[in-house]
Image (spheres, rainbow, N blue to C red):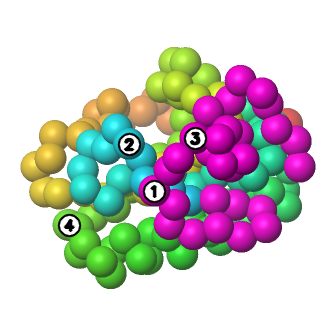
Amino acid sequence: MTAHADCIFCKIIAGDIPAFKLCEDDDTLSFMDINPYNDGHCLVIPKGHYENLYAMPDDAMAAVSIATRKVAAAVNAALEPDGLNLVQANGPAAGQSVYHFHMHVFPRKTDDKAWMNWRFAPGDMDRIGQIAEQIRAHL
């Protein structure tokens, strides 16, 4: 597995930085977020260093997805939050602060004020169709 010398998550994987680990397997590690918004906020990461979603090979993505579901179920059973978000950011405009792919398991409380940053409003159907065509061309 690849590691990046300056990556805080790679240092956690190597044991150079302590963490409140939740579970670990050959491909993934999950641990508590030390800057939690709500109790139970934790992270699931691949052990290989991949900067973002676009750099992730399918097998690493599958491993993270399986581990994320397991951790989310445990958070839900342990804390019984009102809801739970899975949040993953790519690039600074999306709020990515550590450039090692990671999935936030984010327990929610009703009225916790941690809203996503968009409003629901009807879109322009012609524009949506045009953009769908552009995206399909790359699939």
Determine contact: label 1, label 3, CB under 8 Å.
Answer: no
Secondary structure category for the residue under label 4 = loop
| Crowdedness near tag 2: few (<14), some (14–19) or many (≥20) residues, C-alpha within 10 Å | few
Q: Between residues 44 and 91, which one lies in front from this camera angle?
A: 44
For residue 40, side relative to residue 81 (left or right): right
Q: Quadrant of residue 28?
A: bottom right
Residue 20 badge: 1
Asked whether residue 54 appears in the rendered view, the answer is no
Q: Is residue 12 magenta?
A: yes
Number of labelled discs? 4
| Crowdedness near tag 1: few (<14), some (14–19) or many (≥20) residues, C-alpha within 10 Å | few
Q: Quadrant of residue 66?
A: bottom right
Instruction: Tell me if residue 54 comes above or below residue 18 in the rendering.
Output: above
Kind of residue indicated by mark 1: Phe
| Residue at mark 1 to residue at mark 3: CA–CA distance | 10 Å
Determine contact: label 2, label 4, CB under 8 Å.
Answer: no
Pointer 4 residue: 82
* Foreground tag (3 vs 4): 3
Secondary structure category for the residue under label 1 = loop
Secondary structure category for the residue under label 2 = loop
Give, as a single range, the part of the protein colored magenta: 1-29
Kind of residue indicated by mark 2: Ile
* Foreground tag (2 vs 4): 2
Mark found first going from the N terminus, 2 or 4: 2
Kind of residue indicated by mark 3: Ile
| Crowdedness near tag 4: few (<14), some (14–19) or many (≥20) residues, C-alpha within 10 Å | few
Secondary structure category for the residue under label 3 = loop
Q: Position of residue 38 (x, y in %)?
A: 24, 50
| Residue at mark 3 to residue at mark 4: CA–CA distance | 32 Å
Determine contact: label 2, label 1, CB under 8 Å.
Answer: yes
Pointer 3 residue: 17
